Image (spheres, helix red, strand yellow):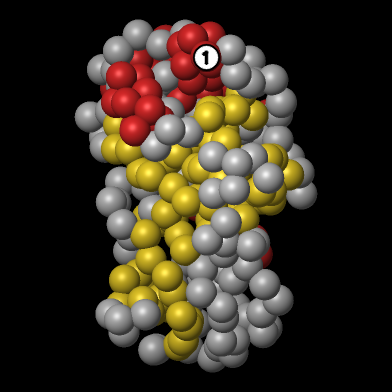
């Protein structure tokens, strides 16, 4: 892979902060540093990575709690999320009180990101995909060469993101998954997309790792392997196919 990564579970939620490293240059980006800077810095040093920037998928506190401090400490820029998540950054004090997290500072990203933008990790480029629903400004990072996607809280292992937070929206999230994430290349036509939806994503060892329900009448392509990092889960999976099991 042109990019390698290390998952760093942080905060009491064990959120998957991710260190992305360009194999050629060893330059790196840290994605969603939600807290526990000492653990993050230790991992960066262990990997001998050269940290260039902070990337943010969305502005819930378990994903941004250490962003301001880390950016200030290392003098590196912050990129993302999409600007619709500004209100969540403004609500950091309320998030701290609600969820019992350590004190965190608000910040303004050096660059808000929009659908179709790209960001750099060393010599590698990540495509930015705007996937609202969990939050209105949620984005996903996708590296085509490595077939690697960091999906934030859009997808979980066996589930999808919550939509009961302020400005979350279930229908919007489903559309984001259908239209933006599944799959990452041209797909056959999907005839409908009900609220209850089953796709079995299969790993190379033939074990089912994620189920999402889809309509019975469905045409699906065979896809190339895609590695997906799921938050709150310590594993990544190389999928060799998606097929209908309804």
**Front position in the image: 20 or 90:** 20
Q: Position of residue 66 (x, y in %)?
A: 42, 19
Please state if 87 lies on the left or on the right of 186 as rendered: left
Residue 59: image location, x then y, percent: 51, 29
- Please count the marks in the image: 1
Q: Residue at x 57, y 56 (%)?
A: 2
Position of residue 245 relative to residue 166, above or below, is below
User: Does dot 1 land on a helix, a strand or a loop?
Assistant: helix
Above or below, 195 against 16 in this view is: below
Q: Quadrant of residue 184?
A: bottom right
Q: Is residue 242 above or below residue 38?
A: below
Q: Residue furthest right?
A: 116
Label 1 Cα crowd, 10 Å radius (few <14 / some 14-19 / many 20+)? few
Q: What residue is at 29 percent from the left and 51 percent from the top?
A: 233
Residue at image location 45% in from the left, 39% down from the top: 19
Check disc 1 and report the residue beneath it.
Answer: 74
- Residue 143 in the figure: left or right of residue 116: left
């Amino acid at each position: 892979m042109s990019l390698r990564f290390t998952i760093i579970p942080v905060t009491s939620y064990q959120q998957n902060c991710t260190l992305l490293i360009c194999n050629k240059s060893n330059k790196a980006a840290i994605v969603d540093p939600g807290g526990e800077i000492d653990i993050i810095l230790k991992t960066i040093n262990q990997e001998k990575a050269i940290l260039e920037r902070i990337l943010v998928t969305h502005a819930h506190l378990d994903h941004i709690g250490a962003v301001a401090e880390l950016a200030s400490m290392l003098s590196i820029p912050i990129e993302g999320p999409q600007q619709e998540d500004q209100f969540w950054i403004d609500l950091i004090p309320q998030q701290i009180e609600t969820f019992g997290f350590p004190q965190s500072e608000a910040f303004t990203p050096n660059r808000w990101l929009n659908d179709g933008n790209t960001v750099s990790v060393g010599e590698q480029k990540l495509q930015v995909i705007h996937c609202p629903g969990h939050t209105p400004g949620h984005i996903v990072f996708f590296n085509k060469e490595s077939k690697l996607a960091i999906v934030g809280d859009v997808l979980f292992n066996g589930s999808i993101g919550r939509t009961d937070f302020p400005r979350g929206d279930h229908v919007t999230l489903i559309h984001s998954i259908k239209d933006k994430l599944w799959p990452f290349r041209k797909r056959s036509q999907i005839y409908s997309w009900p609220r209850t939806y089953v796709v079995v994503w299969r790993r190379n060892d033939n074990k089912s790792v994620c189920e999402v329900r889809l309509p019975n009448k469905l045409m699906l392509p065979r896809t190339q392997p895609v590695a997906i990092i799921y938050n709150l889960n310590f594993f990544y999976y190389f999928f060799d196919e998606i097929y209908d099991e309804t």
